[in-house]
Amino acid sequence: MTHLGASSTLRHTVWVLRGNPVTAIAAAGTLALALVAIVGPALVAYDPVASDVPLALQPPSAAHWAGTDQLGRDVFSRLVVAARLDLAIAVTAVGISFALGAVIGSLCGYAGGRLDRVVGRFVDVLMAFPLFVLAMAMVAALGNRVENIVVATAIINLPFYIRFARAEVNVRRNLGWVESARACGDSHVSVVLRFLLPNVLPAMAVQISLNLGWAILNAAGLSFIGLGVKPPTPEWGIMVAEGARFISTGRWWLVAFPGLALMLAVLCFNLLGDGLRDILDPRMRT
Amino acid sequence: MGTIGATLIRATRRFVSSLPALFGVLVFTFLLMRVLPGDPAVFFASGPNAGKEEIEVIRKQLGLDKPMPEQLAIYLYDVGRGNLGRSMMTGQSVEKDLRERLPASFELTLTALLIALTSAVPLGVLAALRPGSLIDHGVRLFCSLGVCVPTFVSGLLLIYVFYYLLGVAPDPTGRVDVFATLPPSRTGFLVIDFLLAGDLDGWWAAIRQLMLPAFTMALFVIAPLARITRASMLVSLGSDFVRTARSVGLSRWRIVVTYALRNAILPVITIAGIVFSTMLGANVLVEKVFSWPGVASYALDALLVSDYAPVQGFVLLMATIFVIVNLLVDLVYGIADPRATVA
């Protein structure tokens, strides 16, 4: 990209951020979240899995900012430590489905024909399931482990990326620059991977951010119903599940704080996605 | 007549075209459940000290000793006859179990959908009528937050506020009080059955029990519905036919409801189909939070003791309902927009 192009993109970004401070806040929030996930576990004051029964079920206080749970573990420390696992699950899952979906979708959009029909049928089958139910069945089938939550979340996201990449490549396959690449002797695979794929990536990148929030909710939902993550591992969904038993006796902090963590994470990703769309795709600006 | 005929043809065509997907769903579910971990034959043998022969007998009984393709063929044949296998957990046929529990799930989901639609559409319309106003910002804030709070968290927090703090909600477990006498089951919907039996106290108790879970589920889907209503109302209010309607002096109500909303409703219908898929998923979480005796909690219980058949039946049921709902959405779409039927 030329110097002029880069600086105008930067100027556009600054202009968008100034006009839309929400995006800036969301970006800061996402950064903060990533930071917590990376260094948080080293900084927490209490061991997230060490129980201290005499201190069980204390409401929030100066010593325990988010109170303690039924085993006397510090809820705030557990929240911070859990950020790494929750984010890792969502990021890996979305990363896998993005990479696979982009390649499969581009190949289908470019080649058409039989491959396209077979993949299309497969996508139709996946889309015929309510997605959460499908994820649930897959985790149960593949084995009740964290890796399988990642796999299940990746698979239920796959159809969106395949369809998106397919449609975007399909409208570009007969454009001049694609034909000239082919005329220069590039193989079909090379045309797809070196020219078409990079061309559709920016539009797909926006989907990633929106998708991450959804993936977090999905993974937390699975561990809430007892799939994937097992206690005593700190994870936001399972913390809510453990706290659920105490809600009707008024121990709100066991549910409210992990819930708040989930909500903030999803909110940041969603707002960032909306903002990214405004920056990367000026045509779709709302 | 022409419209009805066209709608029927369209319905048939759509149904036929959704059959391959439904078949795929069957095969996919079968494959998923066959790779489930753990050997159910061992699990359901009388215990850890069960003999080898005993396990073999159970395996034969379950048909697990046959080759995969044959098992699939048998499975397809059984599903074709409405036989979904037997639940080892309840000892009943899965079909019977599901049929007993389905009304509870339907009552919950439909109430939630009703609440969501009746609050989301007016909210979206109000926001679109005064863009940039306080109510517009309020609706937008609510929408942004609404999609971020997981159903299971909002459900638990509602319990905290309405059951623990305010004490207005009943004990948040199940559909009725354990000591209550159930009305004769006619529709399976307790709210209707109590009414038919003339038991007003029971009816009120059932409604109170239903409100928290239904609102929990509705909260999560109000956001996308209100958002799309607002966006499409804005387009429709800015169009020429609304300007014309204004200029000829029609009443405000008539302009907004008859002209603008009628034209703005199509995207809302489309989204409603997607929303329903979310709700079928959210059903699992909400039924778990409120110990609601529906099909989802049945499947969850079975899942945790690796009882194949109920989970398989449940997934299949959900996929089938989803296909049917998509079909219905398509038909409603055709009725709301005659252009879709012609094309």
Image: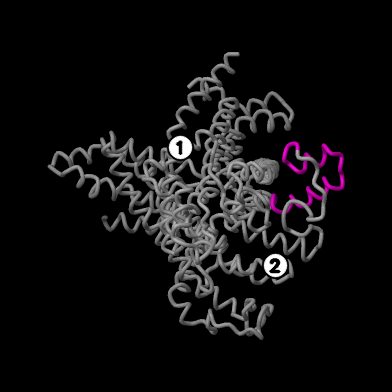
Colour mode?
A: one colour
Is residue B191 covered in magenta? yes
Question: Residue at coordinates 44% horizontally, 39% vertically from top-left?
Answer: B74
Q: Quadrant of residue B225?
A: top right
Q: How packed is label 2: few (under 14 Cα within 10 Å), some, or many (20 or more)?
A: many
Left or right of A220? Residue A195 is left
Same chain, marks 2 and 1? no
Left or right of A10? Residue B143 is right
Tag 2, which secondary structure?
helix
Q: Report, in whole angstroms, how far the alpha carbon at label 2 lies from the one at label 1.
A: 44 Å
The residue range painted magenta reads B186-215
The circle on residue B76 is 1
Count of numbered badges drawn on the protein: 2
Residue A19 in view here: no
Q: Position of residue A39 (x, y in %)?
A: 44, 77
Q: Quadrant of the N terminus of chain A?
A: bottom left
What amino acid is at disc 2? Answer: Ile
The residue carrying mark 2 is A247
What amino acid is at disc 1? Answer: Leu
Q: Quadrant of residue A112?
A: top left
Q: Label 2 lies in what chain? A: A
Q: What secondary structure do most residues of the magenta stretch adopt? A: helix
Residue A61 in view here: yes
Is residue A155 covered in magenta? no
The circle on residue B288 is none
